[in-house]
Amino acid sequence: NMVRPLTHPALIHYVEGRAISLKVASKYLKEVHYLSNDKSYFAVGFRNDNDGFELRNGLDFKGKTANGITTFDCETKNVAIFEGFFDFLSALE
């Protein structure tokens, strides 16, 4: 697997098509390249607390490299729970 900043035009187009700005996406998403059945793929990745990624691309692919939740300690008394990372990113927008 290779993880790098989000730069691939197809992935940026996909994220912006979901109404997420590149500014927000760049803070929380990575570009993840991986192999599956000896074929190369890439997707946006949202890191979870188990050091894995939730993966999505514009071709309706949904996957993960490791199960886990993602938490952020914002040092507040409030808690917000989101079903998926695009819900989280939409709330930030």
Image (tube, rainbow, N blue to C red):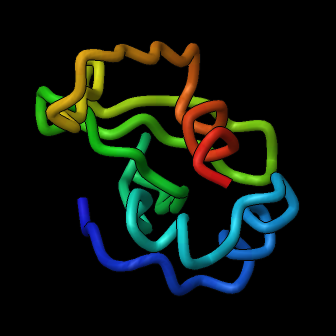
Tell me what residue is drawn at x 42 percent, y 35 percent: 54
The quarter of the picture where the N terminus appears is bottom left
Residue projecting furthest to the front: 77
Of 41 and 54, which appears nearest the observer? Answer: 54
Of 23 and 54, which appears nearest the observer? Answer: 23
Tell me what residue is drawn at x 80 percent, y 48 percent: 59
The quarter of the picture where the C terminus appears is bottom right
Tell me what residue is drawn at x 71 percent, y 60 percent: 20
88 to 92, vertically: above or below: above
Tell me: 18 left or right of 71.
Answer: right
Of 89 and 34, which appears nearest the observer? Answer: 89
Tell me: 8 left or right of 21.
Answer: left
The image quarter in which residue 52 lies: top left
The image quarter in which residue 56 lies: top right
Count the marks: how many?
0
Residue 48 percent location from the top left of the image = 25, 33
Of 45 and 79, which appears nearest the observer? Answer: 79
Residue 64 percent location from the top left of the image = 40, 30
Residue 22 percent location from the top left of the image = 62, 77
61 to 38, vertically: above or below: above
Residue 65 percent location from the top left of the image = 30, 33
Tell me what residue is drawn at x 57 percent, y 24 percent: 84
Residue projecting furthest to the right: 17
Tell me: 79 left or right of 59.
Answer: left
